[in-house]
Each structure stands twice: as C-alpha cells, then as structure tokens.
Amino acid sequence: MYAIGDYIVHPGQGVCQVKDVTDSPEALYQLLPVGQRHPVHISFPVASEDRLRPVLSRDEAEKIIDDYPAMDVDPYQARNVSLEEEHFRQEIRTGSCRDSVRIVKTFRARIAGLSERNKKPPVAYERILKQARERSCLELSVALGVTPEDVAVLFQQRMGEDPSEN
C-alpha cells in the first residue's frame, strides 16, 4: 500500500502524488497528477493498486540516462501507422520508464531517417514521440528532483549534443 506523499505512476495519467487514502465505502487513493496545467484529483481503488507502480529511484533514473546512447531502438513494425501507434501507446501506458525512453529514441531515429530521405514523417510518429517524451521526462524529473527541461538537457549532454542548439 502506498502512503500519502508517495509518487506513483498511473497507467493513464502518468506520474501522480498520493494525496489521501479514504476508506468509505471502499478504500480509494486520491491522486493528483504532476506536471499538468489543470490537474484533477483522481480516485483510484486500492484493490487495483497492482496497476500502479512506484516512481523510479534516483539510481535507476541515472542508469537510464547513462544507458541511453547504447539503448537499442524498438524494431516493432506493423502493417500501418495506426496499428503501430496503438502498440506504442499501450506500451507507454503499461511499460516502464525505460520503455518510454526507448520509444523516444526509436521515434527520434524514425523521424530523422524519413527526414534524411526528404519524406514527411506521419503525424502519429510525432504524437507517439511527444507522449513518450513527456511521460519519461516527468518520471525522471521526479526521481532526480529536477525539472523535465533539465532532464532533456541531461539526455542531450549524454548524447554529446549542445543543449543551446535547441
């Protein structure tokens, strides 16, 4: 059972903080999503807490950032972009932070590859990239105690890119 003040990852809302635990008539977590413009409290049954997971530790977050340059891209390909989008959205919702980071790397590579060939990447690729980037940067920022923008800079530095160029 999670305690008040704990940070957890909700499958649909991403990183949330446990604000309260109520007992009537059934036990519910009162969750507040982190990093949203207009967060709304979410009631989540304690009985379904196996769908929640704790936010990474600082060591795990640092390891993900350190491993990023050597991380493999995801080879999944579907018959069409819609099926790919569905697959990756589900993986972002139910997977770990490492999975989301791998998806970010995958779609950065796919978009860059298409751009090099003067092809316009599908809009779905941008949507997947944005969702995976937001989910992973927010979780990593909570684990490291920094802003999501600082996490993006850490990744750029790890890849040898100059953060001032973006």
Image (cartoon, helix red, strand yellow):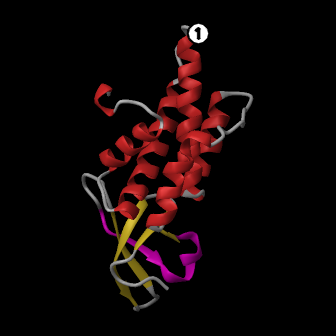
In this view, the residue in front, 163 or 109, is: 163
Residue lying at the far front in this picture: please name it: 160
x and y, in percent, of residue 153 in the image:
35, 41
Q: Is residue 145 above or below residue 17?
A: above
Number of numbered markers: 1
Image point 50% across, 25% down: which residue?
123
x and y, in percent, of residue 82 in the image:
62, 32
Type of amino acid under label 1 = Arg
Image point 59% across, 35% down: which residue?
106
x and y, in percent, of residue 1 in the image:
49, 86
In this view, the residue in front, 106 or 50, is: 106
Label 1 secondary element: loop
Is 28 magenta? The answer is no
In this view, the residue in front, 96 or 131, is: 96
Quadrant that contains the C terminus: top left
Which corner quadrant of the image does residue 44 belong to?
bottom left
Which corner quadrant of the image does residue 154 belong to?
top left
Image point 61% across, 43% down: which residue?
88
Image point 43% across, 42% down: which residue?
155
Q: Which residue is mark 1?
A: 117
Q: Residues within 10 Å of mark 1 (few under 14, many from 20)?
A: few
x and y, in percent, of residue 65 in the image:
49, 50
State left or right for residue 2 relative to residue 91. left
Q: Is residue 160 above or below residue 48?
A: above
- What stretch of residues is rendered in magenta? 40-52
Q: Is residue 91 above or below residue 1?
A: above
Is 44 magenta? The answer is yes
In this view, the residue in front, 145 or 158, is: 158
